[in-house]
Every structure is written in C-alpha cells, then in structure tokens.
Image: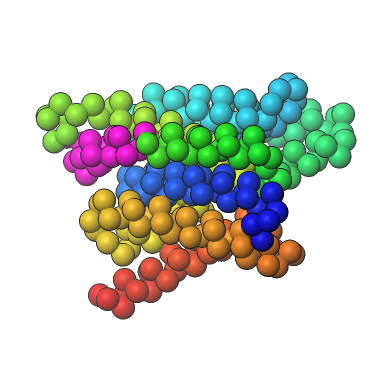
Amino acid sequence: MLSHEFIRNAYLAGTFVALACGLVGWFTVLRGQVFAGDALSHVAFVGAIAAAVVGVDERVGLFALTLGLAAVMAGLGRRAQANDVTIGVVFSWVLGIGVLLIAVLSTGSSGGDGLIVANTLFGSIFGLGAGQSVAAAAVGVGVVLATVAIARPLLFASLDAELALLHGVPVRALGLALLLLIGAVTAEGTQAIGALLVLGLIAAPAGAALRLTSRPYIGMALSAAIALVAMWGGIALSYAVPSLPPSTAIIALAVGAYALASAVSTIAL
C-alpha cells in the first residue's frame, strides 16, 4: 500500500491534520463551541468557491475567509467566545454568499468547476500532491504547537473565566486564538476530508475522550490519538475497499469511537 505515492501523501497530510483536529477539538467540545466549528467548515467551503470565482489558489480563499470570519466571530462574542446568535448570523450570511458564488461559478460551467465543488464538500485526500501534503503537514504541526503552547491558560480560562481574569489570564486573547486555530484546522481539514465532514474529526474524537476521562491532559492526548487512529484506519480501509470514499471511512471510524466510548462510560457508571 505504501508503495503508492498518493497513499504516502495521504498519510503525511492526514497524520498532522488528525493530530491538530484532535487537540483543537478537545477545547472546542469542552467550551461548547462545536457550532462555531460547524459554521467555520461552511465558511471554508465558501472560501474555496470564492477563490475559484476570482481565479486564485483554493487555499488562499480557504484560509483568508475562514480565519477572517473566525476573528469576526471572536470580536462579536463575549470574551471572544462566540455565542449561538453571533454564529447563526455569520452562518446565514455565509450560506447566502455561498449560494450566490455557486450561481456565479455555474454560469461559465465546466467539469473543473463541478470538481472543485465536490472536492471542497467531500475532500480529496488521495488527490493531494507532494507539495500540498507537505503544506498540510506544516499547518498541522503549527496548529499542534500553538495549541500546546496555550493549553494551560486556555484550560484555566475554559473552566473558570472569572477566576482566570482575576489571575491576569488574557481570557479574550485566548478565546480569539482558539477560534483562529479552529479556523486554521477547518480550512486545512477541508482539503483532506471535506467541509461537510471535517467537523466530525474535530468533535467525535474529543467527545469520546471527554467521555472516557476527566483528566485534561490525558483527555487531550486521547482525543488526538483517536483522531489519528481514525485517519490512519480510514485511509487503509478506503484503499482496501476502493468503492468506499476515504472521508466517509475516516469519519465513520471517528464516530464509531465516540459510540464505543459512550457505551463504555455508561457501563462504567
């Protein structure tokens, strides 16, 4: 299997995207910001379509719009933690822009345009070139290092924001940083497993880890490990069963891990 270059590229990109999703996802679920992650995955889709309309690299649109609107949501939210109303407004606006851009894109309709839409929605991890895989890995490493660097104060701010403020913790700056990290991992994850499914890799492993342990650092590591196993297993499973899309296999394993963790935690109680 590893004799194929596209498989090696998929594992290179997928490994670090999964680790980033697992770590950032743990804080996303802990802080109840899964809806923000869902909104940003749709922003990533619109960003990719906007890039196609303008005629620039897809990654420019993905990161520019996703990070930009993550900052906007942080600015509108209390202590940079966007509430559901703020997210809903951004969500509605972005979806409206997305419909308009798809209509614009379809006016000069070509097979390539349809492929862009499909790849953005469902990902194309087997279609990543060597340069794209290295770039995805670099982004993943950056997100992991940034998350680890702010993990301790962010955990304090997440558990008790008022007390954290009294101790001089920059709660608002940390909230902004987390939303930017969610935006970055969503934008990069969209290229691998698609805008429709990337939220599953952010939320499901984290949810499983929180079901299995209340110890934060063990939970973070467990979330990253579950996401990594789901990524590796999904790629292998899709290779073994060519009719099974890799994105579907990856998310199915992640959701399966959450279901198993829920069953184990229920039995333990």
- Measured as percent of width and height from the top left, residue 13 is found at 57, 44
Quarter occupied by residue 113: top right
Quarter occupied by residue 97: top right
Q: Please tell me which residue is depicted at 38% across the width and 55% down the height of the picture.
A: 223
Magenta segment: does it hold 155?
yes
**Residue found farthest to the front:** 3
- Measured as percent of width and height from the top left, residue 57 is found at 69, 26
Q: Is residue 139 above or below residue 65?
A: below
Is residue 164 something one can see in this rendering? yes
Q: Is residue 237 above or below residue 178?
A: below
- Measured as percent of width and height from the top left, residue 189 is found at 56, 43
Q: 186 and 243: which one is in front?
A: 243
Is residue 97 something one can see in this rendering? no
Q: Is residue 259 above or below residue 54?
A: below
Q: Which range of residues does the magenta coloring cover?
A: 146-162
- Measured as percent of width and height from the top left, residue 159 is found at 22, 44
Q: In the figure, is residue 177 to the left or right of 243?
A: left
Q: Please tell me which residue is depicted at 42% across the width and 71% down the height of the picture.
A: 260
Q: In the figure, is residue 38 to the left or right of 169?
A: right
Quarter occupied by residue 190: top right
User: Which quadrant: the C terminus?
Assistant: bottom left
Q: Please tell me which residue is depicted at 36% across the width and 28% down the height of the picture.
A: 176
Tally the numbered discs: 0
Q: 255 and 105: which one is in front?
A: 255
Q: Please tell me which residue is depicted at 54% across the width and 58% down the height of the picture.
A: 232
User: Which quadrant: the N terminus?
Assistant: bottom right
* Overall secondary structure of the magenta section: helix
